[in-house]
Amino acid sequence: MATVVAFHAHPDDEVLLTGGTIARLAAEGHRVIIVVACDGAVWDGPDRDRRLAELRTSAAILGAETAVHLGYADSGHGPVLFEDPPGRTRFVRASVEEAAGRLAGVRVVEATLPRELVARLARPLLLFRLLTRQRLVEMRQYGLPRSAITHRVDVRCYAARKRAALAAHRTPLSGRGRGATLFRTLIKSPLPVFRIACGTEWFAEPGGRTGDLVGGDQAAGLGRPG
């Protein structure tokens, strides 16, 4: 059995980028811990507790052992960086050393997307307004080149669980923020469609490729003894 830490910026990222992998590793008997840096709420208030409760529900659906919040406030997005809430630091202002200390130095691989795939999908996603507040030129730089990706995981068998975990994040799904329309569309889509859209997850080892990318499934390589 391995201990796998899935570290993300805020709630719902754990589903979109790694939900199927978490479900698969947990089902195979591994101990999975989900860690989020911030709570997903730009301001203190009911959204803060709600987002963290949704995270715990999502983690339980995926089969993770626990979900941990490092205590940072959400950084927000856009050109304006708001002041820190009373007694808390926005994640974007945290020092790397402090954040790494809170995470106890545990980092396995980085969840990502193939840049070539994002570039191919960017224009239709913007055209049909499934994504807003995004710029085409910026989206074409998202993710990593395929040559830098070290792990590709087939999670099609866990698509239903991944979709249910995404639906647990009711707060962002009911809003009008960036990506909300796309998330709602994914959740309402038939399972075979969701399986095609979200049935593969990609990861890259810190420091770059350490060997040739195997063409097949690579879930076993994600575990680390712990």
Image (cartoon, rainbow, N blue to C red):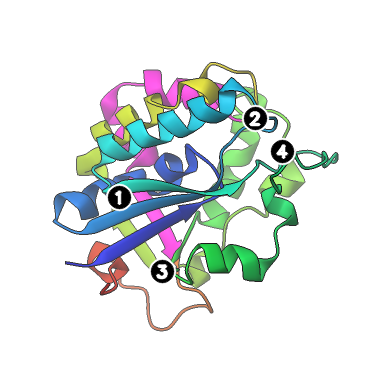
Residue found at x 26% / y 48%: 65
What is the C-alpha distance between the residues marked 3 and 1?
13 Å
Q: Position of residue 51 (x, y in %)?
A: 50, 30
Residue 22 marker: 1
What is the C-alpha distance between the residues marked 4 and 3?
26 Å
The residue pinned by badge 4 equals 76
What is the C-alpha distance between the residues marked 3 and 2?
28 Å
Tag nearer the camera, 4 or 1: 4
Q: Position of residue 199 (x, y in %)?
A: 32, 43
Q: Residues within 10 Å of mark 4 (few under 14, many from 20)?
A: some
Tag nearer the camera, 4 or 2: 4
User: Is label 4 in a helix, a strand or a loop?
Assistant: loop
In reply to whether residue 226 is colored magenta, the answer given is no
**Magenta span:** 179-203
Q: Is residue 9 visible?
A: yes
Q: Amino acid at mark 2?
A: Arg
